[in-house]
Amino acid sequence: MRRTLAALLLAVTALTGTATAAFADKPVDIIVEDTAGVLDKNTLIPAVKDIDFYEPTTVAVYTRAGAYEDNFNEEVLTYARAEHPEWLSADGQKWADGLYLFALDPVGRQVGTYMGEDRKVDLADRTAIQESTYDFLRDAQWTDGTIKGIESGAEIINRPWYKSPAFLGTMAFLGLGCAAGFITRLVVRARNLRLAREAIRKGDASYSSVTADLDVTELNANTIPSGSAYGARVLEKYRVFGDSYSQATTLSNTVHAFTDKEMKKGRNRKKAEEYERIAVQLDGDDDLIADTNSLLNLAPGWESAWDRQVAPFRKDLEEVDNVVSFPGAPGTANALAAFRDAASRNLSDWAENLGRRAITPESALDRLRDARQQLSELLRQHAYAVSDAYAKTQEEARMMRRAMDDSFMRPSRRSNGILDTAYPGTVFISAGSFNHGYSAGRSSVSSARQAAAAASRPSTGYGSSGGSFSGSGSSSRF
């Protein structure tokens, strides 16, 4: 088998010459203009930074909340002319060299791909890139869909001829498919090595922090008042802290004994990732234990511990302005704004009363829990109201509510705070989950309305305002 592969690789090398030198380049720049407010940049940007292109490429992402009937190509060009003229060629008639622009309209249900002349691909390839995102976008997974669109573009843009489907098909027909499989295996193994190293690095940082604070964590746990309902629930987590630390220690010894060759195996990469997961969780748990002890005993530094508990709620209050701007529901919008103002005052009062010992920490946490639950219900009712305003029929309204409720109940990243530990089954709806839920509901209705147009032909024109612009690009509906 090795001899066969060697012979096949020599044959491919003879055919391709020095073309195999055309390998991966990370994006030279990443510009994200999320005017629709649907992308998680903390997830998107690191993922895009890790994508390999065949040539150094500037990646731009643009989202807008438009309408179904919009000429999306025209809207993208208009935005580029107004806000990013550097995306255009010097004469303004093409997209700039080195540019790959991925555009998305989650409301108008359109997705587009645009390239500089030195990065352009044919219409069939642009359509294939767009179609690769449909499953994500139809499920309102805007960030994942965008990442997929950029990955698909990177796989096609400036693709060497020897990696084209036609050439690979010919090689497969000639029996060189095994060579492609061998190369794929090399790529997968290299990826496993990179991910394993990164997981070990992150795991080591958390594990070292936990190890350095072991004595302090034990002291904090021993002084948490077990008679407190909140303290008792955090102590339940501490009871398994030692077992988790032992597990992390074992995994640490295991993964640090791996050679590079061993880390290229998928099962060993997973062990490294498990080490990272447990170590990061422990690092959060010892902070939780410290905050619980400090706050419940009103020990020195309790103010910082309290601030960390209210931080998620305070962030949601700050984002209420974005939520109440949705049209069609003035009653629920006014209720949210009034609650925001009252709750902001209450946060200051609770901190002051804690400082004067006028209320107990348990009472303050109870009030924070009740306030977060009240905000959750107000956000839910506002979501229903704005969806009713968007729906044209009762069936559409029911469809939107079902989609929103499903979205609200999906697991989300929770803070490692005292409330989340004390009430692990409670779903606190945030401003972010409101936006995601509403988008999911609207997408559900839009998909039903546009089912017949889901496979519509791609659009390549730039409309009346495009003038003589002839840049490579097209859009389609999902």
Image: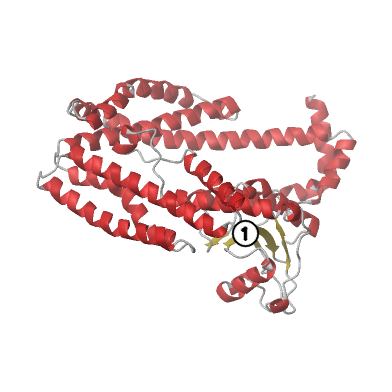
Identify the residue at image location x=22%, y=53%: 346
The image quadrant that residue 450 belongs to is bottom right
Percent x, y for residue 177? Answer: 82, 34
Q: Type of residue at label 1?
A: Leu
Q: Total label count?
A: 1
Residue 2 seen in the figure: yes
The image quadrant that residue 232 belongs to is top left
Q: Nearer the viewer, residue 153 or 464?
A: 464
Q: Residues within 10 Å of mark 1 (few under 14, many from 20)?
A: many
Percent x, y for residue 160? Answer: 77, 51
Tell me if 365 is positioned left or right of 358 in this view: right
Residue 309 seen in the figure: no
The residue under label 1 is: 104
Tell me if 341 is positioned left or right of 275 in this view: left
Identify the residue at image location x=23%, y=26%: 218
Q: Helix or strand or loop: what does disc 1 sit on?
A: strand
Identify the residue at image location x=40%, y=58%: 332
Q: Decide: is 345 above or below 417.
A: below
Q: Nearer the viewer, residue 142 or 333?
A: 333
Q: Decide: is 57 above or below 254.
A: below
Percent x, y for residue 419? Answer: 30, 38
